[in-house]
Structures are given as structure tokens and as C-alpha cells.
Image: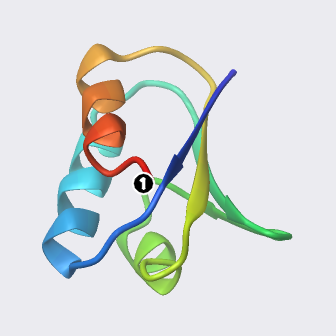
Amino acid sequence: MELKKVKFNQVDEVKEFVSAAVKCDFDIDVTYNKVIVDAKSFLGVLSLASLPVVVEMHGENNHFQSVCQKFAC
């Protein structure tokens, strides 16, 4: 499991993140404090968009990791 801290400033950034997450064949969680949402859920990720969140990847995908790096905070 790999953890990355990210933050989104615009809806297009959330759309890009979720689009990359959907292409992964493993679970990805986005957490803020005790709130956990599925990274493949646009509305779930959008609800946490203005907050610094932690992305928990339960697998590896180079494209998704580069997208996470783009939004790292």
C-alpha cells in the first residue's frame, strides 16, 4: 500500500484524477480525517476537493502515480 497526500483546486483536476483511478484494477481510497471515499467516485472525491487528502493505493499503476504526483501537496 502506498500513500500520497494530494489537493485539488479545480473540478478539472478532480476529473483527471478520477479518470486515472477508474483505469486501475485495484482499490484506491481517498481519506480526510475519518472520512473515506472511493477514488473512482467523482462525487465522493469532489466533496473533498478543497482539502488536503491522503490517497491510499492498494496496487501499482505508473500513470496513476504520475497523476497523483501532479497534485501532490
Residue shown at 36%/70% (left/top)? 42
Q: Is residue 45 left or right of residue 52?
A: left
Residue shown at 31%/55% (left/top)? 18
Q: Is residue 30 above or below residue 24?
A: below
In the image, residue 73 lies at what x, y percent? Answer: 45, 53
In the image, residue 28 lies at what x, y percent? Answer: 56, 41
Residue furthest to the front in view is 73
Residue furthest to the right in view is 34
The residue that disc 1 covers is 40
Q: Is residue 22 left or right of residue 49?
A: left
Residue shown at 18%/55% (left/top)? 16
The 10 Å Cα crowd at callout 1, few under 14, some 14 to 19, many 20 or more, is many
Q: Is residue 41 above or below residue 69?
A: below
- Residue 13, quarter of the rendered image: bottom left
Residue type beneath disc 1: Lys
User: Is 25 in front, or is 39?
Assistant: 39
- Residue 27, quarter of the rendered image: top right
Q: Is residue 62 above or below residue 30?
A: above
Q: Is residue 32 above or below residue 63?
A: below
Q: Is residue 2 left or right of residue 42?
A: right
Identify the colour scheme used: rainbow
Residue shown at 52%/26% (left/top)? 26
Residue furthest to the left in view is 12
In the image, residue 61 lies at what x, y percent? Answer: 36, 17
**Quadrant (top left/top right/bottom left/bottom right) for the N terminus:** top right
Q: Is residue 70 left or right of residue 12?
A: right
User: Is 43 in front, or is 11?
Assistant: 11
Q: Secondary structure at mark 1?
A: loop
Number of callouts: 1
